[in-house]
Amino acid sequence: MRSPGLAELFITADTVPSGSTIRADVVIAGAGAAGITIARELAGTDLKVVVLESGGFEYERETQALYYGTVSGSPYDLEGSRLRFFGGTTNHWGGWVRPLDDSDFAGRDWIPGTGWPIERAELDPYYARAFEITSQLDDRNFVWEDWRTETALDVSPLIETENFTSAIYRISPVRFNDTYRPDLEAADNVTVYLRANLVDIRLDESDDVEAFGVATLQGNTFEVVGSQYVLALGAIDNARMLLRTPTVPSGPALGDHSDKLGRYFMDHIEAPVGTVVLSTDLPDVYKGGNQGLVRAALTLTPEAQQAHELGGVAFVLEEGPRWEDPNHPEELPPEVVAGVLGALQDSEPTTWVVHVRAEPQPNPASRITINGEVDALGVNTVDVHRELTAEDHARLGRAVELLASELGEQGAGWMRIDAPGLGENDSSLFYGFHHMGTTRMSVDPADGVVDPDGRVHGSDNLWVAGSSVFPSVGYANPTLTIVALALRMSDQLAAG
Ligand SMILES: Cc1cc2nc3c(=O)[nH]c(=O)nc-3n(C[C@H](O)[C@H](O)[C@H](O)COP(=O)(O)OP(=O)(O)OC[C@H]3O[C@@H](n4cnc5c(N)ncnc54)[C@H](O)[C@@H]3O)c2cc1C
Protein backbone atom coordinates (compact mmCIF):
# COMPACT_ATOMS: atom_id res chain seq x y z
CA MET A 1 0.00 0.00 0.00
CA ARG A 2 2.91 2.38 0.64
CA SER A 3 4.44 3.87 -2.41
CA PRO A 4 8.20 3.72 -2.80
CA GLY A 5 9.90 7.07 -2.54
CA LEU A 6 7.37 8.48 -0.12
CA ALA A 7 8.13 8.62 3.56
CA GLU A 8 6.68 5.88 5.67
CA LEU A 9 3.69 7.71 7.03
CA PHE A 10 2.88 9.48 3.80
CA ILE A 11 0.86 7.23 1.54
CA THR A 12 -0.26 8.03 -1.95
CA ALA A 13 -3.97 7.42 -2.17
CA ASP A 14 -3.58 5.96 -5.66
CA THR A 15 -2.32 2.82 -3.94
CA VAL A 16 -5.36 2.41 -1.67
CA PRO A 17 -7.67 -0.23 -3.17
CA SER A 18 -11.08 1.06 -4.20
CA GLY A 19 -13.81 0.11 -1.79
CA SER A 20 -11.50 0.03 1.26
CA THR A 21 -12.42 1.56 4.58
CA ILE A 22 -9.70 3.23 6.64
CA ARG A 23 -10.37 3.82 10.33
CA ALA A 24 -9.14 6.64 12.52
CA ASP A 25 -10.09 8.72 15.54
CA VAL A 26 -9.63 12.10 13.90
CA VAL A 27 -9.91 12.64 10.15
CA ILE A 28 -8.58 15.94 8.81
CA ALA A 29 -9.28 16.97 5.22
CA GLY A 30 -6.76 19.50 3.91
CA ALA A 31 -3.07 19.90 4.78
CA GLY A 32 -2.48 23.64 4.66
CA ALA A 33 -1.71 25.94 7.58
CA ALA A 34 -4.75 24.78 9.56
CA GLY A 35 -4.70 21.05 8.78
CA ILE A 36 -0.95 20.61 9.30
CA THR A 37 -1.13 22.50 12.60
CA ILE A 38 -3.85 20.22 13.95
CA ALA A 39 -2.08 17.05 12.76
CA ARG A 40 1.19 18.19 14.40
CA GLU A 41 -0.57 18.98 17.63
CA LEU A 42 -2.20 15.57 17.75
CA ALA A 43 1.08 13.82 16.90
CA GLY A 44 2.24 11.70 19.81
CA THR A 45 -1.22 11.49 21.41
CA ASP A 46 -3.07 8.19 21.60
CA LEU A 47 -5.42 9.30 18.84
CA LYS A 48 -5.09 7.74 15.41
CA VAL A 49 -5.06 10.64 12.96
CA VAL A 50 -5.62 10.48 9.22
CA VAL A 51 -4.94 13.51 7.01
CA LEU A 52 -6.42 13.61 3.50
CA GLU A 53 -4.56 15.97 1.20
CA SER A 54 -5.62 16.55 -2.39
CA GLY A 55 -2.13 17.19 -3.76
CA GLY A 56 1.35 15.72 -3.50
CA PHE A 57 4.41 17.62 -2.35
CA GLU A 58 4.59 19.76 -5.51
CA TYR A 59 2.28 21.79 -7.71
CA GLU A 60 0.47 19.68 -10.30
CA ARG A 61 -1.74 21.29 -12.89
CA GLU A 62 -4.39 18.57 -12.91
CA THR A 63 -4.86 18.74 -9.14
CA GLN A 64 -4.85 22.53 -9.07
CA ALA A 65 -7.63 22.43 -11.71
CA LEU A 66 -9.90 20.87 -9.06
CA TYR A 67 -9.97 24.38 -7.55
CA TYR A 68 -11.56 25.78 -10.72
CA GLY A 69 -14.41 28.19 -10.02
CA THR A 70 -16.17 31.13 -11.58
CA VAL A 71 -16.06 34.72 -10.40
CA SER A 72 -18.87 37.26 -10.34
CA GLY A 73 -19.13 40.63 -8.60
CA SER A 74 -15.82 42.45 -8.22
CA PRO A 75 -12.98 41.06 -10.37
CA TYR A 76 -11.01 38.46 -8.42
CA ASP A 77 -7.96 36.34 -9.25
CA LEU A 78 -9.25 33.04 -7.90
CA GLU A 79 -6.61 30.99 -9.68
CA GLY A 80 -3.65 32.83 -8.15
CA SER A 81 -5.08 33.01 -4.69
CA ARG A 82 -4.57 29.47 -3.38
CA LEU A 83 -2.51 26.34 -3.96
CA ARG A 84 -3.76 22.77 -3.87
CA PHE A 85 -0.91 20.60 -2.60
CA PHE A 86 0.68 19.64 0.72
CA GLY A 87 1.31 22.87 2.65
CA GLY A 88 -1.59 24.54 0.82
CA THR A 89 -1.39 28.25 0.17
CA THR A 90 1.59 28.62 2.55
CA ASN A 91 3.60 27.31 -0.42
CA HIS A 92 3.52 30.90 -1.69
CA TRP A 93 2.27 33.08 1.13
CA GLY A 94 4.06 36.30 2.10
CA GLY A 95 4.52 35.41 5.78
CA TRP A 96 3.14 38.67 7.24
CA VAL A 97 1.68 37.90 10.64
CA ARG A 98 -0.06 39.89 13.31
CA PRO A 99 -2.82 39.03 15.79
CA LEU A 100 -6.23 40.62 15.52
CA ASP A 101 -6.75 43.50 17.95
CA ASP A 102 -9.05 43.37 20.98
CA SER A 103 -11.35 45.76 19.17
CA ASP A 104 -11.69 43.30 16.25
CA PHE A 105 -13.12 40.69 18.61
CA ALA A 106 -15.32 43.27 20.36
CA GLY A 107 -16.75 44.45 17.04
CA ARG A 108 -17.86 47.89 15.95
CA ASP A 109 -21.45 48.96 16.54
CA TRP A 110 -21.32 51.15 13.45
CA ILE A 111 -20.41 48.26 11.11
CA PRO A 112 -23.14 45.61 11.06
CA GLY A 113 -22.03 42.01 11.51
CA THR A 114 -18.64 42.73 13.10
CA GLY A 115 -17.42 41.14 16.34
CA TRP A 116 -16.65 37.62 17.49
CA PRO A 117 -18.43 35.40 20.01
CA ILE A 118 -15.07 34.90 21.78
CA GLU A 119 -12.71 37.46 23.26
CA ARG A 120 -9.13 37.98 22.23
CA ALA A 121 -8.01 36.75 25.70
CA GLU A 122 -9.33 33.32 24.74
CA LEU A 123 -6.80 33.17 21.89
CA ASP A 124 -3.85 34.85 23.61
CA PRO A 125 -2.14 31.65 24.81
CA TYR A 126 -2.59 30.15 21.36
CA TYR A 127 -1.34 33.27 19.57
CA ALA A 128 2.05 32.95 21.28
CA ARG A 129 2.51 29.41 19.97
CA ALA A 130 0.98 30.22 16.61
CA PHE A 131 3.63 32.90 16.19
CA GLU A 132 6.38 30.32 16.69
CA ILE A 133 4.75 28.01 14.13
CA THR A 134 4.03 30.58 11.44
CA SER A 135 7.26 32.53 11.75
CA GLN A 136 9.97 30.67 13.67
CA LEU A 137 11.38 34.04 14.73
CA ASP A 138 12.69 35.28 18.07
CA ASP A 139 10.08 35.83 20.72
CA ARG A 140 9.98 39.60 20.48
CA ASN A 141 6.39 39.91 19.65
CA PHE A 142 4.22 42.70 18.34
CA VAL A 143 4.97 45.20 21.08
CA TRP A 144 6.27 48.50 19.79
CA GLU A 145 8.26 49.24 22.95
CA ASP A 146 10.21 45.97 22.73
CA TRP A 147 11.44 46.92 19.31
CA ARG A 148 12.28 50.38 20.46
CA THR A 149 14.55 49.22 23.24
CA GLU A 150 16.09 46.09 21.78
CA THR A 151 17.10 46.90 18.26
CA ALA A 152 19.41 49.14 16.36
CA LEU A 153 16.55 50.02 14.03
CA ASP A 154 15.05 53.47 14.17
CA VAL A 155 11.73 52.65 15.80
CA SER A 156 10.12 56.04 16.21
CA PRO A 157 6.50 56.52 15.27
CA LEU A 158 6.00 58.46 12.08
CA ILE A 159 2.97 60.09 13.66
CA GLU A 160 1.35 59.32 16.99
CA THR A 161 -1.99 61.09 17.42
CA GLU A 162 -5.51 60.51 18.65
CA ASN A 163 -6.32 59.02 15.26
CA PHE A 164 -3.16 57.18 14.24
CA THR A 165 -0.82 54.76 15.88
CA SER A 166 1.53 52.14 14.44
CA ALA A 167 1.31 48.37 14.42
CA ILE A 168 4.11 45.83 14.22
CA TYR A 169 3.96 42.95 11.75
CA ARG A 170 6.50 40.11 11.80
CA ILE A 171 7.40 38.71 8.40
CA SER A 172 8.84 35.27 7.72
CA PRO A 173 7.17 33.08 5.11
CA VAL A 174 7.59 29.67 6.73
CA ARG A 175 6.68 26.97 4.20
CA PHE A 176 4.57 24.46 6.08
CA ASN A 177 5.34 21.88 3.38
CA ASP A 178 9.02 21.16 3.98
CA THR A 179 9.20 22.75 7.45
CA TYR A 180 6.63 20.52 9.12
CA ARG A 181 6.73 17.42 6.92
CA PRO A 182 9.41 15.76 9.12
CA ASP A 183 7.23 16.15 12.23
CA LEU A 184 4.40 14.27 10.57
CA GLU A 185 6.79 11.65 9.17
CA ALA A 186 8.06 11.03 12.69
CA ALA A 187 4.59 10.69 14.22
CA ASP A 188 3.52 7.04 14.49
CA ASN A 189 -0.09 7.96 15.07
CA VAL A 190 -0.47 10.25 12.00
CA THR A 191 -0.90 9.02 8.44
CA VAL A 192 -1.10 11.49 5.58
CA TYR A 193 -2.77 10.34 2.38
CA LEU A 194 -1.58 12.39 -0.58
CA ARG A 195 -3.59 12.81 -3.79
CA ALA A 196 -6.61 12.00 -1.61
CA ASN A 197 -9.54 14.25 -2.42
CA LEU A 198 -12.44 14.61 -0.06
CA VAL A 199 -15.42 14.31 -2.40
CA ASP A 200 -18.25 13.30 -0.11
CA ILE A 201 -19.36 13.89 3.48
CA ARG A 202 -21.63 10.98 4.42
CA LEU A 203 -24.09 11.78 7.21
CA ASP A 204 -26.17 9.58 9.50
CA GLU A 205 -29.81 10.34 10.29
CA SER A 206 -28.84 12.81 13.04
CA ASP A 207 -26.56 14.75 10.69
CA ASP A 208 -23.37 13.51 12.28
CA VAL A 209 -20.63 12.50 9.89
CA GLU A 210 -20.37 8.77 9.28
CA ALA A 211 -17.52 8.83 6.77
CA PHE A 212 -15.45 11.01 4.49
CA GLY A 213 -15.58 9.73 0.91
CA VAL A 214 -12.27 10.01 -0.96
CA ALA A 215 -11.43 9.87 -4.67
CA THR A 216 -8.19 10.14 -6.60
CA LEU A 217 -7.67 11.44 -10.11
CA GLN A 218 -6.50 7.89 -11.00
CA GLY A 219 -10.02 6.64 -10.26
CA ASN A 220 -9.68 5.02 -6.79
CA THR A 221 -12.45 5.63 -4.30
CA PHE A 222 -12.44 4.71 -0.61
CA GLU A 223 -13.81 5.87 2.74
CA VAL A 224 -12.32 7.04 5.98
CA VAL A 225 -14.40 6.45 9.09
CA GLY A 226 -13.55 8.31 12.29
CA SER A 227 -15.01 9.74 15.46
CA GLN A 228 -14.22 13.40 14.75
CA TYR A 229 -13.87 15.05 11.35
CA VAL A 230 -12.21 18.35 10.45
CA LEU A 231 -12.63 20.40 7.29
CA ALA A 232 -9.44 22.42 6.67
CA LEU A 233 -9.80 23.10 2.95
CA GLY A 234 -9.44 26.90 2.94
CA ALA A 235 -12.36 29.31 3.23
CA ILE A 236 -13.83 28.72 -0.22
CA ASP A 237 -13.73 24.94 -0.23
CA ASN A 238 -14.87 24.55 3.38
CA ALA A 239 -18.09 26.17 2.22
CA ARG A 240 -18.04 24.29 -1.09
CA MET A 241 -18.00 20.87 0.59
CA LEU A 242 -20.78 21.81 3.02
CA LEU A 243 -22.90 23.34 0.27
CA ARG A 244 -22.94 20.02 -1.58
CA THR A 245 -23.90 18.00 1.53
CA PRO A 246 -27.68 17.89 2.02
CA THR A 247 -28.79 17.13 5.59
CA VAL A 248 -31.60 14.94 4.33
CA PRO A 249 -32.06 14.21 0.67
CA SER A 250 -33.12 17.53 -0.85
CA GLY A 251 -32.96 19.26 2.57
CA PRO A 252 -30.81 22.34 3.26
CA ALA A 253 -27.07 21.84 3.05
CA LEU A 254 -25.25 20.90 6.23
CA GLY A 255 -24.60 24.13 8.14
CA ASP A 256 -27.10 26.07 6.05
CA HIS A 257 -29.83 25.97 8.71
CA SER A 258 -30.03 29.79 8.75
CA ASP A 259 -29.10 30.64 5.15
CA LYS A 260 -25.66 31.83 6.26
CA LEU A 261 -23.51 29.12 4.66
CA GLY A 262 -21.23 30.52 1.93
CA ARG A 263 -22.23 34.10 2.75
CA TYR A 264 -20.02 36.86 4.17
CA PHE A 265 -17.08 35.95 1.95
CA MET A 266 -14.41 38.55 2.69
CA ASP A 267 -10.94 39.56 1.60
CA HIS A 268 -9.01 42.62 2.70
CA ILE A 269 -9.41 45.66 0.48
CA GLU A 270 -5.93 46.48 -0.77
CA ALA A 271 -4.70 49.22 -3.09
CA PRO A 272 -2.03 51.83 -3.55
CA VAL A 273 -3.94 54.95 -2.59
CA GLY A 274 -1.50 57.82 -2.51
CA THR A 275 2.00 59.22 -2.72
CA VAL A 276 3.74 60.89 0.19
CA VAL A 277 6.68 63.25 0.40
CA LEU A 278 7.88 63.21 4.01
CA SER A 279 9.55 66.10 5.76
CA THR A 280 11.94 63.77 7.61
CA ASP A 281 13.47 60.36 6.90
CA LEU A 282 11.05 57.50 7.22
CA PRO A 283 11.96 55.55 10.41
CA ASP A 284 13.53 52.16 9.52
CA VAL A 285 10.78 50.13 11.10
CA TYR A 286 8.30 51.18 8.40
CA LYS A 287 10.62 50.13 5.58
CA GLY A 288 10.79 46.81 3.80
CA GLY A 289 13.99 44.84 3.99
CA ASN A 290 14.98 45.72 7.56
CA GLN A 291 16.28 42.32 8.56
CA GLY A 292 13.24 41.03 6.70
CA LEU A 293 11.61 40.34 10.02
CA VAL A 294 9.68 43.35 11.19
CA ARG A 295 7.59 45.99 9.52
CA ALA A 296 5.38 48.72 10.91
CA ALA A 297 2.23 50.10 9.39
CA LEU A 298 0.20 53.15 10.34
CA THR A 299 -3.13 52.08 11.77
CA LEU A 300 -6.23 53.80 13.02
CA THR A 301 -6.71 53.87 16.79
CA PRO A 302 -9.91 52.25 18.11
CA GLU A 303 -10.99 55.76 19.17
CA ALA A 304 -10.57 57.05 15.61
CA GLN A 305 -12.49 54.10 14.24
CA GLN A 306 -15.35 54.95 16.57
CA ALA A 307 -15.24 58.73 16.09
CA HIS A 308 -15.12 58.49 12.30
CA GLU A 309 -17.19 55.29 11.98
CA LEU A 310 -14.36 53.43 10.30
CA GLY A 311 -13.17 49.82 10.31
CA GLY A 312 -9.69 48.41 10.81
CA VAL A 313 -7.18 49.96 8.40
CA ALA A 314 -3.41 49.60 7.98
CA PHE A 315 -1.28 51.84 5.78
CA VAL A 316 2.01 50.33 4.58
CA LEU A 317 4.64 52.54 2.94
CA GLU A 318 6.70 51.32 -0.01
CA GLU A 319 9.55 53.27 -1.52
CA GLY A 320 8.39 55.15 -4.60
CA PRO A 321 10.31 57.02 -7.28
CA ARG A 322 12.30 60.17 -6.66
CA TRP A 323 10.16 63.24 -7.06
CA GLU A 324 11.24 64.30 -10.51
CA ASP A 325 10.41 67.96 -10.46
CA PRO A 326 9.69 69.13 -6.94
CA ASN A 327 8.72 72.58 -8.15
CA HIS A 328 6.31 71.48 -10.82
CA PRO A 329 3.55 74.05 -10.32
CA GLU A 330 0.40 72.06 -11.14
CA GLU A 331 1.47 69.05 -9.07
CA LEU A 332 2.55 70.55 -5.80
CA PRO A 333 0.64 73.10 -3.75
CA PRO A 334 2.78 76.13 -2.82
CA GLU A 335 2.74 75.30 0.88
CA VAL A 336 4.40 71.98 0.09
CA VAL A 337 7.14 73.63 -1.87
CA ALA A 338 7.61 76.13 0.93
CA GLY A 339 7.21 73.65 3.76
CA VAL A 340 8.07 70.04 3.20
CA LEU A 341 10.38 70.48 0.26
CA GLY A 342 11.93 73.56 1.81
CA ALA A 343 12.81 71.45 4.83
CA LEU A 344 14.49 68.97 2.54
CA GLN A 345 16.51 71.82 1.02
CA ASP A 346 18.40 70.70 -2.05
CA SER A 347 18.03 66.97 -1.68
CA GLU A 348 15.74 65.32 -4.17
CA PRO A 349 13.01 63.82 -2.00
CA THR A 350 12.04 60.16 -2.11
CA THR A 351 8.36 59.53 -2.41
CA TRP A 352 6.55 56.81 -0.49
CA VAL A 353 3.62 54.98 -2.01
CA VAL A 354 0.86 54.42 0.53
CA HIS A 355 -0.76 50.99 0.33
CA VAL A 356 -3.96 50.43 2.23
CA ARG A 357 -5.15 47.14 3.75
CA ALA A 358 -8.68 47.66 5.00
CA GLU A 359 -11.37 45.60 6.65
CA PRO A 360 -14.49 45.02 4.54
CA GLN A 361 -17.91 44.94 6.11
CA PRO A 362 -19.28 41.38 6.54
CA ASN A 363 -21.70 41.39 3.63
CA PRO A 364 -24.22 38.58 3.14
CA ALA A 365 -24.34 39.34 -0.60
CA SER A 366 -20.65 38.44 -0.92
CA ARG A 367 -20.92 34.71 -1.19
CA ILE A 368 -19.81 31.33 -2.45
CA THR A 369 -22.48 29.40 -4.34
CA ILE A 370 -22.58 26.17 -6.31
CA ASN A 371 -22.27 27.27 -9.95
CA GLY A 372 -23.80 24.35 -11.84
CA GLU A 373 -20.52 22.84 -13.05
CA VAL A 374 -18.47 19.95 -11.69
CA ASP A 375 -14.75 19.24 -11.49
CA ALA A 376 -12.93 16.16 -12.85
CA LEU A 377 -14.06 14.19 -9.79
CA GLY A 378 -17.71 15.16 -10.18
CA VAL A 379 -17.63 17.62 -7.26
CA ASN A 380 -19.73 20.75 -7.74
CA THR A 381 -17.64 23.81 -8.44
CA VAL A 382 -18.40 27.25 -7.04
CA ASP A 383 -18.92 30.84 -7.97
CA VAL A 384 -17.07 33.44 -5.90
CA HIS A 385 -19.06 36.64 -5.67
CA ARG A 386 -17.28 39.45 -3.84
CA GLU A 387 -19.21 42.64 -3.42
CA LEU A 388 -18.06 45.67 -1.46
CA THR A 389 -20.77 47.87 -0.03
CA ALA A 390 -21.23 51.61 -0.60
CA GLU A 391 -20.21 52.00 3.06
CA ASP A 392 -16.99 50.08 2.43
CA HIS A 393 -16.09 52.58 -0.29
CA ALA A 394 -17.10 55.59 1.78
CA ARG A 395 -15.14 54.33 4.83
CA LEU A 396 -12.06 53.75 2.73
CA GLY A 397 -12.27 57.25 1.25
CA ARG A 398 -12.64 58.81 4.72
CA ALA A 399 -9.71 56.82 6.15
CA VAL A 400 -7.38 57.89 3.34
CA GLU A 401 -8.43 61.53 3.65
CA LEU A 402 -7.87 61.36 7.40
CA LEU A 403 -4.32 60.11 6.86
CA ALA A 404 -3.57 62.80 4.28
CA SER A 405 -4.83 65.60 6.51
CA GLU A 406 -3.14 64.23 9.63
CA LEU A 407 0.27 63.93 7.92
CA GLY A 408 -0.08 67.56 6.85
CA GLU A 409 -1.29 68.81 10.24
CA GLN A 410 1.54 67.05 12.05
CA GLY A 411 4.09 68.53 9.66
CA ALA A 412 5.15 65.00 8.78
CA GLY A 413 4.72 65.36 5.06
CA TRP A 414 2.40 65.91 2.16
CA MET A 415 0.20 63.22 0.67
CA ARG A 416 -1.42 63.23 -2.74
CA ILE A 417 -4.40 60.88 -2.99
CA ASP A 418 -3.86 58.89 -6.19
CA ALA A 419 -6.72 56.40 -6.30
CA PRO A 420 -9.34 57.38 -8.88
CA GLY A 421 -12.87 56.56 -7.75
CA LEU A 422 -11.77 55.93 -4.17
CA GLY A 423 -14.80 56.27 -1.97
CA GLU A 424 -17.17 55.35 -4.81
CA ASN A 425 -16.25 52.26 -6.80
CA ASP A 426 -13.94 49.25 -7.14
CA SER A 427 -11.96 50.43 -10.16
CA SER A 428 -8.67 50.92 -8.33
CA LEU A 429 -9.10 48.39 -5.55
CA PHE A 430 -7.48 45.00 -5.18
CA TYR A 431 -7.52 42.33 -2.49
CA GLY A 432 -5.06 40.51 -0.29
CA PHE A 433 -5.62 36.88 -1.34
CA HIS A 434 -7.05 36.34 2.14
CA HIS A 435 -10.18 34.23 1.85
CA MET A 436 -12.36 34.65 4.94
CA GLY A 437 -15.97 34.33 6.09
CA THR A 438 -18.30 31.70 4.47
CA THR A 439 -18.82 29.52 7.60
CA ARG A 440 -19.02 32.26 10.22
CA MET A 441 -18.81 31.54 13.92
CA SER A 442 -21.81 32.33 16.14
CA VAL A 443 -23.34 31.42 19.49
CA ASP A 444 -26.84 31.29 18.06
CA PRO A 445 -27.26 28.89 15.10
CA ALA A 446 -29.51 31.54 13.57
CA ASP A 447 -26.50 33.82 13.14
CA GLY A 448 -23.88 31.52 11.71
CA VAL A 449 -22.60 28.14 10.56
CA VAL A 450 -20.23 26.97 13.32
CA ASP A 451 -20.31 27.40 17.08
CA PRO A 452 -17.60 29.32 18.99
CA ASP A 453 -15.46 26.16 19.09
CA GLY A 454 -15.64 25.71 15.32
CA ARG A 455 -18.09 22.80 15.29
CA VAL A 456 -20.89 22.94 12.72
CA HIS A 457 -24.11 23.89 14.52
CA GLY A 458 -26.28 20.80 14.76
CA SER A 459 -23.46 18.29 14.17
CA ASP A 460 -21.61 16.57 17.00
CA ASN A 461 -18.50 15.58 15.11
CA LEU A 462 -17.79 17.95 12.20
CA TRP A 463 -15.34 20.79 12.86
CA VAL A 464 -14.32 23.61 10.53
CA ALA A 465 -10.77 24.99 10.72
CA GLY A 466 -9.46 28.08 8.94
CA SER A 467 -10.51 31.64 8.26
CA SER A 468 -13.92 30.59 6.92
CA VAL A 469 -15.05 30.83 10.56
CA PHE A 470 -14.00 34.49 10.99
CA PRO A 471 -17.18 36.54 11.57
CA SER A 472 -15.23 39.74 10.85
CA VAL A 473 -11.63 40.30 9.94
CA GLY A 474 -9.92 43.52 11.11
CA TYR A 475 -6.90 44.64 9.11
CA ALA A 476 -4.38 41.96 10.15
CA ASN A 477 -3.45 39.15 7.75
CA PRO A 478 -5.35 36.01 8.73
CA THR A 479 -2.90 33.12 9.07
CA LEU A 480 -1.67 33.72 12.62
CA THR A 481 -5.29 33.67 13.78
CA ILE A 482 -6.01 30.57 11.64
CA VAL A 483 -3.16 28.74 13.38
CA ALA A 484 -4.16 30.00 16.85
CA LEU A 485 -7.70 28.72 16.30
CA ALA A 486 -6.32 25.41 14.99
CA LEU A 487 -4.24 24.98 18.15
CA ARG A 488 -7.31 25.65 20.26
CA MET A 489 -9.31 23.13 18.23
CA SER A 490 -6.54 20.55 18.67
CA ASP A 491 -6.87 20.83 22.45
CA GLN A 492 -10.60 20.26 22.14
CA LEU A 493 -10.13 17.28 19.82
CA ALA A 494 -7.50 15.77 22.12
CA ALA A 495 -9.81 16.19 25.11
CA GLY A 496 -12.38 14.13 23.22
C1 LIG B 1 0.06 35.25 -2.70
C2 LIG B 1 -0.45 35.06 -1.29
C3 LIG B 1 0.19 35.72 -0.24
C4 LIG B 1 -0.29 35.55 1.07
N1 LIG B 1 0.36 36.20 2.07
C5 LIG B 1 -0.09 36.09 3.33
C6 LIG B 1 0.57 36.77 4.39
O1 LIG B 1 1.57 37.46 4.19
N2 LIG B 1 0.06 36.62 5.64
C7 LIG B 1 -1.03 35.87 5.91
O2 LIG B 1 -1.45 35.78 7.07
N3 LIG B 1 -1.67 35.20 4.92
C8 LIG B 1 -1.23 35.29 3.65
N4 LIG B 1 -1.86 34.61 2.64
C9 LIG B 1 -3.01 33.75 2.99
C10 LIG B 1 -2.54 32.40 3.56
O3 LIG B 1 -1.80 31.71 2.59
C11 LIG B 1 -3.78 31.61 4.00
O4 LIG B 1 -4.44 32.37 5.01
C12 LIG B 1 -3.48 30.24 4.59
O5 LIG B 1 -2.67 29.46 3.76
C13 LIG B 1 -4.81 29.50 4.80
O6 LIG B 1 -4.56 28.28 5.46
P1 LIG B 1 -5.62 27.08 5.31
O7 LIG B 1 -5.00 25.89 5.94
O8 LIG B 1 -6.94 27.53 5.81
O9 LIG B 1 -5.80 26.88 3.73
P2 LIG B 1 -4.71 26.42 2.66
O10 LIG B 1 -3.35 26.79 3.11
O11 LIG B 1 -5.16 26.95 1.36
O12 LIG B 1 -4.80 24.83 2.68
C14 LIG B 1 -5.93 24.11 2.22
C15 LIG B 1 -5.47 22.70 1.89
O13 LIG B 1 -6.61 21.90 1.60
C16 LIG B 1 -6.30 21.05 0.49
N5 LIG B 1 -7.58 20.68 -0.14
C17 LIG B 1 -8.47 21.49 -0.76
N6 LIG B 1 -9.54 20.79 -1.15
C18 LIG B 1 -9.33 19.52 -0.78
C19 LIG B 1 -10.10 18.32 -0.87
N7 LIG B 1 -11.32 18.31 -1.43
N8 LIG B 1 -9.60 17.18 -0.34
C20 LIG B 1 -8.37 17.16 0.27
N9 LIG B 1 -7.61 18.27 0.38
C21 LIG B 1 -8.09 19.43 -0.13
C22 LIG B 1 -5.42 21.92 -0.39
O14 LIG B 1 -4.66 21.14 -1.27
C23 LIG B 1 -4.58 22.64 0.66
O15 LIG B 1 -3.40 21.92 0.98
C24 LIG B 1 -1.42 34.74 1.34
C25 LIG B 1 -2.06 34.08 0.27
C26 LIG B 1 -1.58 34.24 -1.03
C27 LIG B 1 -2.27 33.56 -2.16
Image (cartoon, rainbow, N blue to C red):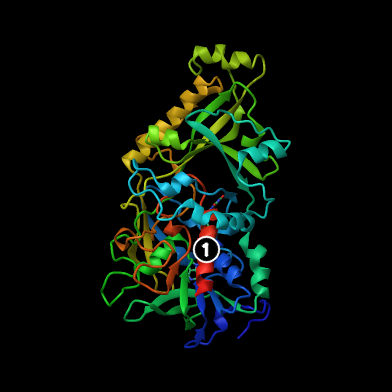
Q: In this orientation, does residue 62 appear?
A: no
Q: The residue under label 1 is which amino acid type? A: Arg
User: Could you say where residue 209 lies in the image, as x and y percent from the top left?
Assistant: 40, 77
Q: In this orientation, does residue 282 appear?
A: yes
Q: In this rendering, would 309 be left or right of 413?
A: left
Determine the secondary structure under disc 1. helix
The quarter holding residue 186 reads bottom right
Measured along the vertical axis of the image, is residue 120 above or below residue 270? below
- Residue extending farthest to the right is 152
* Residue at image point 47% right, 88% down: 19
User: Could you say where residue 495 lies in the image, as x and y percent from the top left?
Assistant: 52, 73
The quarter holding residue 340 reads top right
Q: Which sits in the foreground, 390 or 73?
A: 390
Q: In this rendering, would 418 be left or right of 179?
A: left
Q: Which sits in the foreground, 481 or 128?
A: 128
The quadrant the N terminus occupies is bottom right
* Residue at image point 64% right, 78% down: 9
Q: Which sits in the foreground, 66 or 283?
A: 283
* Residue at image point 44% right, 78% down: 212
Q: In this rendering, would 102 be left or right of 253?
A: right
Measured along the vertical axis of the image, is residue 64 above or below residue 317? below
User: Could you say where residue 78 lies in the image, as x and y percent from the top left?
Assistant: 45, 55
User: Could you say where residue 232 lies in the image, as x and y percent from the top left?
Assistant: 49, 66
* Residue at image point 61% right, 73% down: 43
| Mark 1 Cα shell of 10 Å, populated few (<14), some (14-19), many (≥20) | some
Residue at which label 1 appears: 488
Measured along the vertical axis of the image, is residue 35 above or below residue 78? below
